[in-house]
Amino acid sequence: MYQYNEIDQTLVDERVTQFRRQTEQFLKGEITDDQFRALRLRNGLYVQIHAPMLRVAGPYGLFNSTQFRKLAHIARTYDKNYCHFTTRQNVQFNWPKLEEVPDILAELAGVQMHAIQTSGNCMRNTTSDHLAGVCVDEIEDPRPYCEIIRQWTTLHPEFDYLPRKFKMAVSGALHDRAATQFHDIGLHLVKNAAGEVGFRVLVGGGLGRTPVIGQVIKPFLEKKHLLSYLEAILRIYNLFGRRDNKYKARIKILVRESGLDKFSALVEKEWSQLRDNNELSAARIKAMKEQFIAPAYEDNANVDESYAQLQETHKAFATWVKFNTAAHKVPGYRAAFISLKAPETPPGDMTDIQLDAVADLADRYSFGEIRSTHRQNLILADVKQADLFSLWQQLASLSLATPNIGTVTDMICCPGLDFCSLANAGSIGVAKEINDALDDMDYVHDIGDLKINMSGCMNGCAHQSVGHIGILGVDKKGAEWYQITLGGSSENEAAIGERLGPAVAKDQITLAITKILNVYITNRLNDEPFLAMVNRVGVTPFKEQVYANN
Amino acid sequence: MQIIKDKQIIDDNWNYVADEAELVAGNVSVSFPRWQKDKADLLAHNGKVGVRLGAVDCVEDIAADLSTIDLIELAVVDFADGRLFSQAWYLRNRFAFLGEIRAIGHFMPDQVFYLTRVGVNAFAPENNDYLPFVLSNLNDFSVKYQKSVN
Ligand code: SF4
């Protein structure tokens, strides 16, 4: 994992000093609401329904145990003993006091963390594959490039006041787990015909109000041109992106309105004048790769027999292994998911006690490292198979071992009406109700791979448009209603879900979901997954059941 | 009136002349349309010439004239409109402009560190009382992650 050097540390420390001054000025009435809004957003601070909300960056989802202990401390000292993991691999605190935020940021800087550019119309935290560096289908580890991009984007003097927010994701594996097709810029490490590794660059993808699948602007970009090419895209966007209407200000609209050819010609012209003087040196890439070298794996970790035996004797353990662990490139190791989707807690939430305990488990079993995922869970990426049983037992005692990763109860869900001032409808309560209706784990496991994403409004923070089942809260004359979509996906076969029909009332939404699941169970072919079935039969059979009585 | 130039508070020795107004003696700055219209007169004028650009003006359109211009003013109407950062970058980096680049109007004192990095070297905030504060903000950061003009 990347360790700060003196420059990194100085930068975050100076940022805290700057924000402390800005907060004091605001509290003394020396700067306007509008000005402070722009400044606080660039430090992760929103104003929500009840209190400010502070979003802390999880750089491409990586944390260490010291940082988790600090998050626990912040939750205990400045908040209500919990925090929330988001779909962009960040962490949110829902109850900080405005005047204490500079102190929180100073605490974070003390463990090499910050909240810089986690909101506002600027370049945001770059996200990546949660299995980077350990998965079996990797072309190259994306993390060194993520860190290079993190540094390049942080306090970039030219691009901090963009027309709108700007998000990038990097994937290095065959299977795209970073939703690169739904980002302003998606970077996918690929091999060309000559066997060299470079980036396929996508532009103009995004979720939110107008979901769009990104288009390939550069099928193969040499690594040395990474930053100059990003700079060219950002400069064209900064100058030509629409600023007259915030709903049309994302780069996807610029790309659509000008057409990919014209947009790409502008970028190409800009880039041609930049690239030769702005190469990313092989030495810099090499030095960055050294920050992400593999931990000291044990040889022969796969010789252990207890792992197989314990799965024979403990069915619950075997189920957890099946659903909550993933293959690892080193024999005898697995990546273990920590489910933040226990039925009784809001998706993605974690208490201070759990944070501390997970920090200890990471130290004991996974080289002190923890990752956050796009689906609001965590991963200990490097666990020896011989340790999985005790890890499972301890996670279970912390309510962190619900064996539901990738299943229908592993919902992603935004804060909705409970916390967000933009929401049309509640989402946490609905997630709970759906969870309660699906309390039979065997049924959940029988349904298998199914992603439900639920957002409380059109902004789509929980990416409902790419959920296999998407649920979107809408307001109908002051009442909470829900629009359902089917067949979305953010992975390789990217697709935007199709609307099932009219929105359903709050007291009908859980019933509608269970009906959809029943249609699937009754009509699937052998072990056909839900998404495949929707693609085969379309939405009609589902529609007929959901709206049967209307 | 005073401004900040090259990290010093100094007296401003430029006058902005509105589009319909008569030129005045000394250093004058005019709008981009007026520059385009009255270029010959302005170059014959006894004093230096500056041009004021708005966020919508394209720097490329003035590139060929830059050797005859001593000041470019970047007028900020909305501090959230970040186009001037790229305009300044173009002036200094792509077109190697050596004269003064001055941010005027509604920029935030908190933005001057970034503005300096993209090549702005003078600041005329709306309110002259802000000058000492703007000056101190020029040193918000002692480190940087990426190349720009400075
Ligand atoms: S989707 Fe809407 S309701 Fe949910 S967090 Fe985002 S803005 Fe708020």
Image (cartoon, coloured by chain):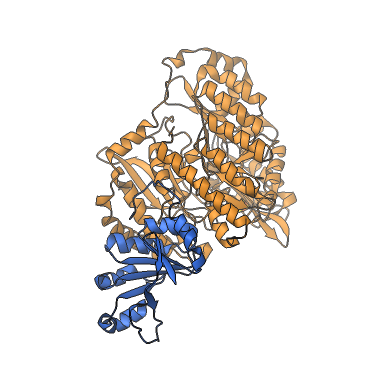
Q: Residue at x 38, y 77 (%)?
A: B15
> In the rendered view of the protein, which quadrant contains the N terminus of chain A?
top left
- Residue drawn 35% across the image and 66% down it: B101
Residue A190 occupies which quadrant of the picture? top left
Horizontal side, residue B19 vs residue A372: left or right: left
* Residue A447: x %, y % from top left: 61, 36
> Color used for chain A?
orange
Please give left or right for residue A228 compared with residue A74 in the image: left
Q: Colour of chain B?
A: blue
Dividing the image into 4 quarters, which one contains the C terminus of chain A? bottom right
Q: Is residue A480 above or below residue B144?
A: below
Query: Residue farthest to the right?
Result: A507
In this view, the residue in front, A37 or A107, is: A107
Numbered label tally: 0
Instruction: Give the residue drawn at x 30%, y 61%.
Output: B92
Question: Looking at the picture, how far across and down is residue B61, in whole percent?
Answer: 30, 72
Q: Position of residue A174 (x, y in %)?
A: 40, 37
The answer to whether one can see residue A153 in this image is yes
- Where residue A294 appears, as percent x and y from the top left, is 40, 26
* Residue nearest the observer in this picture, A128 or A164: A164
Q: Nearer the viewer, residue A7 or A326?
A: A7
Q: Is residue A176 visible?
A: no
Q: In the picture shown, does residue A509 fall above or below A132?
A: below
Q: Front-most of A456 and A453?
A: A456
- The answer to whether A531 is drawn above or below residue A69 in the figure is below
